[in-house]
Image (cartoon, rainbow, N blue to C red):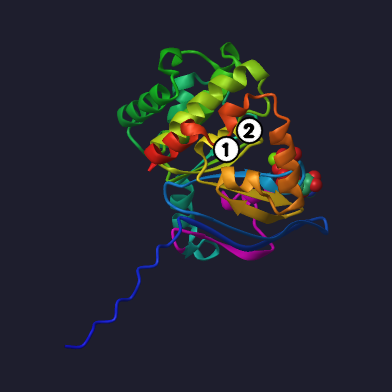
């Protein structure tokens, strides 16, 4: 009997960025970025200020049009999507900003309901989604408040709930803890870690929080001068980096004031990786 030829199943990544380039006023900011994120995968993106991280995130979220290269979402090049398809794809990507971007005159609940309501959902249904999202970030008790009545950490958790309410397949976080004072960073990181470990959606997290990367990321991607220079499992990458920027992060990591047991491999890290998937 003839052997049948087995064609290996090739998984399509949820997001694929290929050769992305962008210049601002003639100055190159993205120099051929290649990056992939699989469904449910947690990828942390780190790099020095000005290396193009936010520009990359905005290209992925269709806020900036790249000059060259392509972005594929769920296997389809986004530049080929028509208006309706683009809106549908955008609804599948949640964005959490550094500066929260909440609407000041709306309550916490209305801020979180806004996305579902604008997408044409009935009020009751949108409200339910919003409550569920607020519960996930431990903010359901504050639904009546307005942003001015919240701490920075609480505002950011509402920002997360707003993105979660749309049940995105991919969440992009652009330095969600960068504008918080150090005491509030912890409460936001705690919720971020919980969400990451639930694996309900893929995450591309731009952050300088090395401990977060070590504990939750499947992959750490390092960016420098407009391209991804190195990627790998966070623990392994930080142990033996090959790029200049990787070596700088390793040194930072080595001199970190955080207890080494919290950062270095330990069972905590292993345990999380095992449970995570
Ligand atoms: N709309 C714009 N017009 C002109 N220049 C821009 C624009 N957006 C970003 N830039 C420039 O592009 C470069 C990369 O900016 P970007 O915000 O992507 O960096 P980043 O890696 O996110 O930095 P940070 O860590 O400080 O947030 C910077 O030099 C910035 O000044
Ligand atoms: Mg930025």
Position of residue 240 in the picture relative to residue 5 (left or right)? right
From the top left corner, tell me how far across and down residue 272 is, in percent. 44, 35
Q: Residue at x 48, y 20 (%)?
A: 108
* Crowding near the residue tagged with mark 2, few <14, some 14–19, many ≥20 C-alpha atoms within 10 Å: some
Name the quarter showing ligand 2.
top right
Against 56, residue 26 (above or below) is below
From the top left corner, tell me how far across and down residue 171 is, in percent. 50, 41
Against 130, residue 119 (above or below) is below
Gap between marks 2 and 1, in whole Å? Answer: 6 Å
Q: Which residues are magenta?
A: 55-75
Element at label 1: helix
The image quadrant that residue 29 belongs to is bottom right
Say whether residue 91 is magenta: no
Res. 167 in view: no
Q: Are marks 2 and 1 in contact (CB under 8 Å)?
A: yes
Position of residue 79 in the picture relative to residue 9 (left or right)? right
**Number of numbered discs overlaid on the protein picture:** 2
Q: Residue at x 58, y 34 (%)?
A: 264
Q: Tell me the residue that label 2 is attached to.
A: 209
From the top left corner, tell me how far across and down residue 225 is, in percent. 77, 53
Q: Tell me the residue that label 1 is attached to.
A: 213
């Amino acid at each position: 009997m003839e052997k049948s030829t087995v064609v290996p199943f090739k998984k399509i990544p949820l997001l694929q960025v290929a050769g992305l380039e962008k210049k601002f006023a003639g100055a190159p900011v993205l120099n051929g970025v290649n990056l992939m994120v699989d469904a449910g995968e947690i990828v942390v993106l780190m790099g020095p200020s000005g290396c193009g991280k936010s520009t990359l995130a905005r290209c992925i979220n269709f806020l900036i049009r790249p000059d060259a290269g392509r972005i594929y979402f769920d296997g389809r090049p986004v530049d080929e999507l028509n208006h309706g398809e683009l809106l549908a794809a955008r609804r599948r990507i949640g964005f959490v900003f550094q500066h929260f971007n909440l609407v000041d005159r709306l309550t916490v609940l209305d801020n979180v309901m806004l996305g579902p309501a604008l997408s044409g959902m009935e009020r009751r249904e949108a409200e339910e989604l919003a409550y569920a999202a607020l519960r996930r970030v431990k903010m359901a008790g504050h639904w009546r408040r307005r942003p001015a009545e919240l701490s920075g950490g609480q505002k950011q958790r509402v920002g997360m709930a707003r993105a979660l309410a749309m049940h995105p397949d991919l969440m992009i976080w652009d330095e969600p803890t960068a504008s918080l004072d150090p005491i509030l960073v912890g409460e936001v990181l705690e919720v971020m870690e919980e969400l990451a470990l639930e694996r309900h959606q893929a995450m591309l997290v731009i952050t300088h929080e090395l401990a977060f990367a070590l504990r939750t990321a499947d992959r750490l991607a390092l960016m420098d001068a407009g391209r991804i220079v190195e990627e790998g499992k966070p623990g392994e990458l930080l142990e033996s980096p090959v790029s200049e920027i990787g070596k700088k992060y390793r040194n930072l990591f080595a001199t970190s004031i955080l207890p080494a047991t919290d950062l270095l491999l330990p069972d905590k890290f292993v345990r999380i990786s095992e449970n995570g998937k």
